[in-house]
């Protein structure tokens, strides 16, 4: 006996012999496999890349690892306004705001800064909404790959992994819109 989507009981006698022994399903699967085999013979095998030595070419609009940018003086641009967290459809961004002290004036641009800024990379869908929402052009998605990790906890990226190093600046000019370029000035 078999149940249908209307919860009516259907007898096995209504099935044909071919359906009972799954012949149509087997031939369909073999047809797909044969189609791919013929395509490989005619067009050639698809390109194979020996990753990580050779990386597959990516589109120019490809979005990868996040970076929190610094300004020309080395201060963090993020002012902990929270617009990136609000714009994130996956709710992957969390932050805690704090007010800077007089001793921290050289570290942060504004009175307020993000004392804790975290992105859960397992939740992130790399949509780029955070960089569009940021009024200070503080966060960008780069062309770099996210590192491979072995446990779930290491996929929560804090400021230690997100803020760019002063001596290792990341060029994001290709990702900036005219509005973002003007906001930085």
Image (spheres, grey):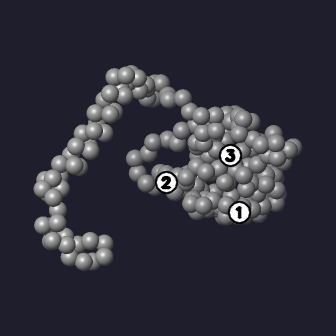
Mark 3 lies on residue: 140
- Give coordinates of residue 8: x percent, y percent: 24, 77
Distance from disc 3 to disc 1, alpha carbons, whole Å, reads: 15 Å
Question: Is 83 situated above or below 106?
Answer: below
Give the residue displayed 41% in from the left and 26% down from the top.
46
Quadrant showing the C terminus: top right
Question: Is 58 situated above or below 6?
Answer: above
Question: Is 131 situated above or below 174?
Answer: below
Q: Residues within 10 Å of mark 2 (few under 14, many from 20)?
A: few
> Of 59 and 32, which appears nearest the observer?
32
- Give coordinates of residue 135: x percent, y percent: 79, 54
Q: Is residue 96 left or right of residue 154?
A: right
Mark 2 lies on residue: 122
State which tag comes first along the sequence, 3 or 1: 1
User: Image quadrant of residue 71?
Assistant: top right
Q: Pointers 3 and 1 in contact (CB under 8 A)?
A: no
Mark 1 lies on residue: 82
Give the residue displayed 26% in from the left and 43% down from the top.
29
User: Image quadrant of residue 184?
Assistant: top right
> Of 163 and 1, which appears nearest the observer?
1
């Amino acid at each position: 006996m078999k149940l249908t989507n209307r919860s009516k009981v259907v007898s096995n006698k209504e099935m044909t012999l071919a359906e009972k022994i799954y012949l149509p399903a087997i031939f369909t699967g073999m047809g797909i496999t044969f189609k791919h085999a013929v395509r490989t013979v005619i067009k050639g095998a698809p390109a194979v890349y020996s990753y990580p030595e050779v990386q597959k070419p990516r589109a120019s609009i490809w979005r990868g690892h996040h970076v929190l940018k610094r300004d020309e003086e080395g201060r963090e641009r993020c002012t902990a306004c929270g617009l990136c967290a609000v714009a994130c459809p996956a709710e992957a961004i969390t932050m805690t705001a704090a007010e800077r002290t007089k001793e921290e004036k050289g570290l942060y641009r504004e009175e307020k800064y993000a004392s804790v800024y975290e992105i859960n990379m397992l939740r992130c869908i790399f949509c780029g909404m955070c960089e569009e929402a940021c009024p200070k052009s503080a966060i960008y998605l780069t062309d770099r790959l996210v590192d491979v990790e072995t446990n779930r906890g290491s996929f929560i990226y804090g400021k230690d992994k997100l803020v760019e190093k002063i001596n290792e600046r990341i060029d994001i000019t290709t990702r900036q819109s005219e509005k973002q370029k003007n906001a930085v000035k």
